[in-house]
Amino acid sequence: MTFTLAHLSDPHLAPLPRLRLIELVGKRVTGYINWQRRRRFIHDADVLGKIVADLKTQPADHIAVTGDLCNIALPEEFVRGAAWLQSLGAPGEVTVIPGNHDAYVRSTIGEPRRRWGDHMRGDDGAGEFPFVRRRGPLALVALSTAMPTGVGMATGTLGATQLARLGETLAALNREKLFRVVLIHHPPVSEAKWHKRLTDAAEFLRVIGAQGAELVLHGHDHLHMLNWLVGPNGTRVPAVGVPAASAAWGMSANSAAYNLYAIDGAPGAWTCEMISRGIGAAGAVIQQRRKKLFG
Ligand SMILES: [Fe+2]
Ligand SMILES: [Fe+2]
């Protein structure tokens, strides 16, 4: 039976909550200026509402959200993030990982776990990354690249501990013959400038090269992306990115969209078809693309 996984990312929930002057410190100052000058014209709550409403008409068995629910990580943004996640689906039906905007400043670094913890933990109840959720023939392997960085920086880092655990986890899930879906905020392959990249992308690609995965899903660059990573024994692993789920039409390179993955077949002979649905020029959500990734 076909299992359908939906993927959306980077909702960057708008509008920004009213903030107190005392909260406008450190990196939030430039983040706030950025929001007022540019980002508030891109991230649109109505557009996000249309994307979510359309997603709800689709036969999705599970929804993956790859981070950046916040903008400048104000305490209130995490509360709104929790309400939005709940509106998307129950914790068992929606898996979230944090993005760099959810770890924007040190003072609210514990908030994703505190507010979104139910949607952000493994089947065993553990919250450390990578955590694993098994759904049908799938194993979702959730990573975190989110860490506070300096002003003007949007990098992400997995770190040696998480990378080592990722390798062990992928190997174990491969022995279980599950369809392994890796969730990561930052793209492992990107054209973005160095200050927006995954700092240990080379190490991540080495783990995928050694242990493989069936699918890697990411956000962060706010673009439709498809890169083929090299797995063991000449296998190829698609790494797919989606635009920001709130991006208004014509305001950035790619307007709001999400992807559906119809997964079928059996271990060693999986099939996977990707369907992209997104906001069109007329303001309605339409099917943009249908592509067989493998099988
Ligand atoms: Fe983002
Ligand atoms: Fe990001």
Image: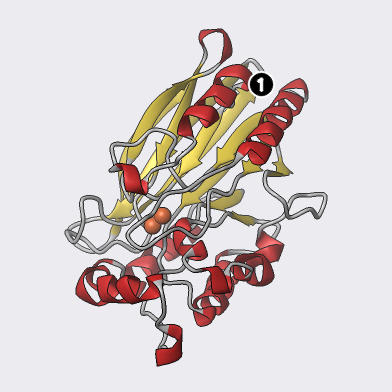
On the image, numbered disc 1 is attached to which residue? 266
Is residue 269 shown above or below 28?
above
Q: Is residue 16 visible?
A: yes
**Residue shown at the point (27%, 61%) measured from the top left:** 284
| Residue 20 in view in this figure | no
Pick the front one: 141 or 199: 199
| The quarter of the displayed image where residue 180 is located | top right
Depicted 203 relative to depicted 47: above or below: above
Q: Residue furthest right?
A: 124
User: For this rendering, which residue is in front, 249 or 17?
Assistant: 17
Q: Is mark 1 within 8 Å of ligand 2?
A: no
How crowded pointer 1 is (Cα within 10 Å; few <14, some 14-19, many 20+) is rated as: few
Residue under the point 63% across and 35% down: 163
Question: In the image, residue 86 lies at what x, y percent?
Answer: 60, 70
> Where on the picture, by quarter, is residue 246?
bottom left
Q: Which residue is pictured at 52% across the width and 13% down the height?
A: 235
Whether residue 13 sits left or right of residue 44 in the image: it is right
Q: Residue 262 at x, y = what percent?
A: 52, 36
Q: Image quadrant of ligand 1?
A: bottom left
Left or right: residue 94 compared with residue 201: right
Amino acid type at circle 1 is: Ala
Above or below, comparing residue 232 to residue 102 in the picture: above
Percent x, y of residue 106 = 54, 68
Left or right side of 17 for 112: right
Determine whether the residue tagged by mark 1 lies in a helix, strand or loop: strand
